Structures are given as structure tokens and as C-alpha cells.
Amino acid sequence: MNARPATLSPERSRVDNTAGFVLHSYPFRETSLIVETFTHAHGRVALVARGARRPRSQLRGLVQAFTPLLLSWAGKGELRTLHRAEWQGGLALPQGMGLLCGFYINELMLKLLAREDPHENLFADYQAALQALSSSALPQSAYAAILRRFEKRLLAELGYAQPFEFEADSGHAVLAQQDYVYVLDRGALPAQRANGHADMRVSGKTLLDMAADDYRDPVTLMQSKQLMRLIINHHLGGQTLHARELLKDLQQL
């Protein structure tokens, strides 16, 4: 996605030409939309797209999920006013299962990312995930692997990096042939030292595969899904991910 550098006008309240994606939009008043965006330079920003629901609005077809845009806005507070959006192209829209996975990623970001907290590395990871999800005829295991990789990077950006290759407390290397238990907010402990504090039992090979982003083993694929669900639910603090519930019903991703 090629973009002109974002610029900040002399008025600190105005931003011009910053690269971003629409995560979600919903109706606001009679003809407008609230557009939740994820931008390269400013992180997650909520914008009012005035008149965007009118049939002849230039914004109507642009402020859609997964659309790569150059965004310009102004205003103060949590809700800014969108002045211009330019389509950047270069990225196919995910289809089918890839589209559902994209909605899951977007919802995860909406619920875990604070507003106006830049995550430039995550922006690149998000683009890469959308690109991967846009590939045609992927097997179910490939979609699951894309989600696990993005979940790991998102948690790391939020300061919750998971050191899957090392034991909690001791820092010893995880052994592929050994069983471990995963304890939330601590990490992996050898099963014999868990002392009843286990949140989930997992193989050492699964932990090492996750550290290497290798999900070819069916056991790793299954256990990594369960483990990441446990960790993410912990950080969501009781919030429900509606897209994930749909994916569970359809494909058990």
C-alpha cells in the first residue's frame, strides 16, 4: 500500500493523508456514520463521516471494512470529523472464510487496542494478515495459522508477549518431549511442578511450534487454538467476540 506521508497541520487538531483501514462503521444520526479506523501513524481513531449514508456521497462506497485508504480528519476529543478518504487499492478483499477471519481480527483490535495509541509494526502485521486471508482456496488449517500468528503479534504489541520457548519462573528452555501446564500471567510450567495452578495442559512441542509460527502439526493446531483462546479471553475481561462465536459455529477455527 503506497501512501503519502501523513502530515499534521499547524492546527494540532487536523491530520492529513495518513494511511489507514476501516475496522467497522455504524449509523450515526440520520445520514452519517461513525467509522472506526486503524491508522499507521495514529493507531485506532474514531471518525464521523458526515452524510456518508446519502446515495450520492463520495464516502459511501469507501468507508467499508478492509478498505486501504488515505484519511484526513480534524477535531478534538475521541470523535473526529472525517474530511477526505482516498482509496489506495493494491489489496484484494477477503472472501468467504477469509472474510469471516478478517472480521474476527477487526473485532479483536477494536476491543483490545486503546484509541490513538500508534502501533506501526502491528499496522504492517495487519496488512500482511489481510493479504494472506485474501488468498483463494486456502485449507482450514491455513486460516487458523494466519489467526494464531496475528493474535501473537497483537498481544506482543500490547505488552503481553508470550515466551512460549521458555519456562515461567526458571527461564529454562521448553523441551519438545515434555508436557507443560500454562498458567495465565505466568507462562508454561513443567506439568510435575504445576501444584494445581494449571489453566491448560499443553505439549512442549506445541509451545515450540507456536514460538516458531509453525502450525503444520494437527496437535499444535488444536492446542494452539485452545491456548490462544484462553489467553485472549483473559485479556478481554469478559467481553464477547461475536465474530469468533460465528467462526466456532462454522469451522471451529
Image: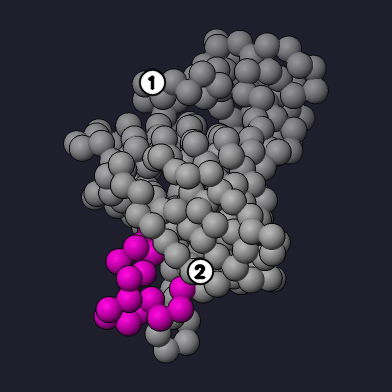
Q: Quadrant of the C terminus?
A: top left
x and y percent of residue 238 in the render?
62, 60
Instruction: Establish if 38 lies above or below 161.
Output: below
Q: Residue at x 56, y 27 (%)?
A: 202
User: Does the residue at mark 2 contact the one at mark 1 (Cβ under 8 Å)?
Assistant: no
Residues shaded magenta: 49-65
Q: Quadrant of the N terminus?
A: top left
Q: Is 110 covered by the magenta stretch?
A: no
251 relative position to 208: left or right: left
Instruction: Establish if 81 lies above or below 154.
Output: below
Q: Is 56 covered by the magenta stretch?
A: yes
Count of numbered badges drawn on the protein: 2
Mark 1 residue element: loop
94 relative position to 115: left or right: left
Residue that carries the numbered disc 2 in the rendered image = 82
85 relative position to 203: left or right: left
| The image quarter in which residue 175 lies | top right
